[in-house]
Image: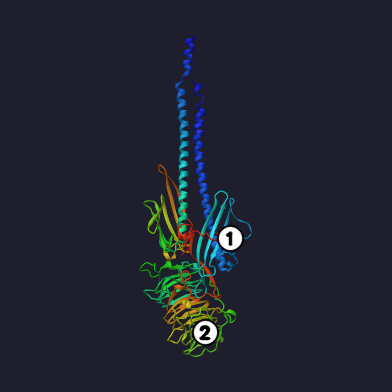
Amino acid sequence: MFSRVSRKSDRRAAFTLTEVLISMALMLVLSVASLTGIVAIARGNHALGNYTVMNAESRLILEQVGQDVRQFTTLTSASVSELGGTLPAASGAGVQSVVYTYDAATQTLTRSVDGVAQRTFRDIDTLAFNFTKADGSSTTTLSMVKQVQLNGRIKLKLGGTAHNTARILTAQFTLRSI
Amino acid sequence: MLRSQKGSALIFTLILAIIVCSAAAAYLRTVMLETRLSTSSLNMNRALHLAEAGIDEALLALNNATSDSWSSAGIDAISRTIEHRSDGTPIQLGGGATGTIKIRIDDPTGEHPVVIAEGIVDHPIAGKVKRQVKVEITRTTESGAGISASDDGGGVGMGLVSKNNIVMNNSAYVDSFDSDVGPWNLNTNRGDKILVASVSGNIQIQNSNIFGQTAVGGGSKSAVSVTQGSLTNGETSAGTRFDQNLITTNVSINLPAAPASPTNSGATAGQALPQNIPNGVTTLGSPGATTPTYYYTTGQNVNLSGNAAFKIVGPVVLVVNGQLSLNGDGIQVEDSGNASLRLYVSGNINANGNGNTPAFNNKTGKANNLVIIANGAAGQNLAVNGAGNSTFAFYGPNYNVNVNGNGHISGSIVANYISLGGSFHYDHRVDPLAPGTRRENALTSEDIVRYHVTTWRELTGRGANYARDTAAPFN
């Protein structure tokens, strides 16, 4: 009798092959689902971080270019990838030159003061300076330029082949001091 | 064994919840950071725009001569703080933020006032943001040359401006020069800062060469035509004779009426000149004087014939209420004793000279020293024949100007219609945008005064040139 009961209880303690298979399948489905969710959350976090970085950078560019352009007393270069001018030197008399150069190969926008690179903005995918006359028509004739606009794109890697991009389109800054 | 596995679902759920919560917390932190950055960026922008509004307010006050009613605040300047709009409500920027504009004008009555404006944004969470902008302003006069050059499209000054057509025939050199350097010289004193502008007509360049810019108001570049001549400037690529880039097509220049002639009373009282100007030299002015001597002709039509001449030896204002004919030795402005002439004429002007000397013989070589203000009704003429080398600034928006002969005219012309038969050189020193001394005489109340910004800079606190202003009202 005892041995019968004992045998019966031994049989109950185990799982059948079907039970194990079903539970494994369920576990698999659940883990895949949760993993996908976690990966999505992580990617979202990464993207959010990217956008924060890009927003901060485009604000900096906007602010810096706007300030310089308004202060230019002469314009020394005006092309799609270069914007240069002179403005009163930070200290003392005279002027200093400020040149923005976009290098498509290294994807950088460099602000040089008196020929020395002073600040470099990275991960600039595309960038073009637009120059317009007072009537809004475009020109690159130095003496005719009255407004400057910057049109570009920042691109950061998200992982794999995916990227995050942010457009930088500034207002048409007026050359206030020319 | 089954009993011991009962809590696993709870643990599994808890772990999941912790993962989700920490992800959400990270999100929230990033969002809050981004919100703070956006708010501060927005407030920075708002502050800059408030400061810009302050600059505009100061310019408006200077142009309308109302800045002297601003509070002096115990400092040697005029300052103003705007915390309320005209309807008395605070400047509300939304989200509980309020704005304040502080302005100070240094040297408001001088030729180069300086305006410093500060925009302050007070945000309930982000706190206060202040930005300061400093602009240097130049005072120019309408007479002779100055209209605000911001209208001209190219950022250069004035030169030949007319309401209607401008016709050039055999004008070998139409360009600019700096009278502070000396007389015009093709090789050593020549620039391209001239503006040839016709507000509502066309510009015909025949056998003439413009080294500068043109502007028309009709919207079409075809209003500028070149027949056997050229339109170029220093930036024109080699080989191009008609540079289409040098045509602005939407120019809009408001040419105010010429200032009225002063009257022979009060501060402008002066000496009367006889009806018939005698032969020989009539000397006008007091050498070395700093204020002008006024002369009023009594005749309706003043005629200098034979060898009759006016010799200007000091600052002079000459008022002709009628027609002026210069058939003799004309008007000479000596290059000494602060000699300068401001000539008011209300009728036709015929400047023929006598073949030996030009009718307007300005020996100083500076157009500011011979300013002609022609304030007659529409249809009057300025005719300059046998011009020789004349230097003057002419302001007569109702007048039709005909310059014959192949001499060189230096200075500026603002008229209703311009026909030019010789070279014309625009004097940089009547360029309202060129910094430095433009006028040799003290300004008088006769001048129409206008202010415009010549330099703009933001006082960021970086470097001596950008040091923040901490004097009142910014303290």
From the top left corner, tell me how far across and down residue A123 is, in percent.
41, 49
Query: In this rendering, does residue A20 appear at all?
Result: yes
What residue did someone put label 1 on? Answer: B81
Q: Residues within 10 Å of mark 2 (few under 14, many from 20)?
A: many
Residue B474 rendering spot, x and y as whole percentages: 54, 59
Vertical relation: B376 (above or below) A177: below
Residue A40: assigned label: none
- N-terminal label among 1 and 2: 1
Q: Secondary structure at mark 1?
A: strand
Q: Which residue is at the front of the view, A5 or B463?
A: B463
Q: Chain of mark 1?
A: B
For the view shown, which residue lies furthest in the front direction?
A: B74
Q: Are marks 1 and 2 on the same chain?
A: yes
The percent coordinates of residue B348 (x first, y second) are 52, 82
Give how far apart the Cα atoms at labels 1 and 2 are: 52 Å
The answer to whether mark 1 and mark 2 are in CB contact below 8 A is no
Count neighbours of disc 1 (C-alpha within 10 A) and say few if under 14, some if 14 to 19, many if 20 or more. some
Which quadrant of the figure contains the C terminus of chain B?
Answer: bottom right
Residue A120 percent coordinates (x, y): 40, 52
The circle on residue B324 is 2
The front one of B340 and A50 is B340
Quarter of the image where one finds residue A161: top left
Foreground residue among B217 and B27 = B27
Examine the rendered structure and indicate whether residue B166 appears above or below residue B359.
above
Subunit of label 2 = B
Q: Residue at x 57, y 77 (%)?
A: B260
In the rendered view, tell whether residue A14 sits above or below residue B167: above
Q: Amino acid at mark 1?
A: Thr
Q: Can residue A135 be seen in the rendering of this structure?
A: no
For badge 2, the amino acid type reads: Leu
Identify the colour scheme used.
rainbow
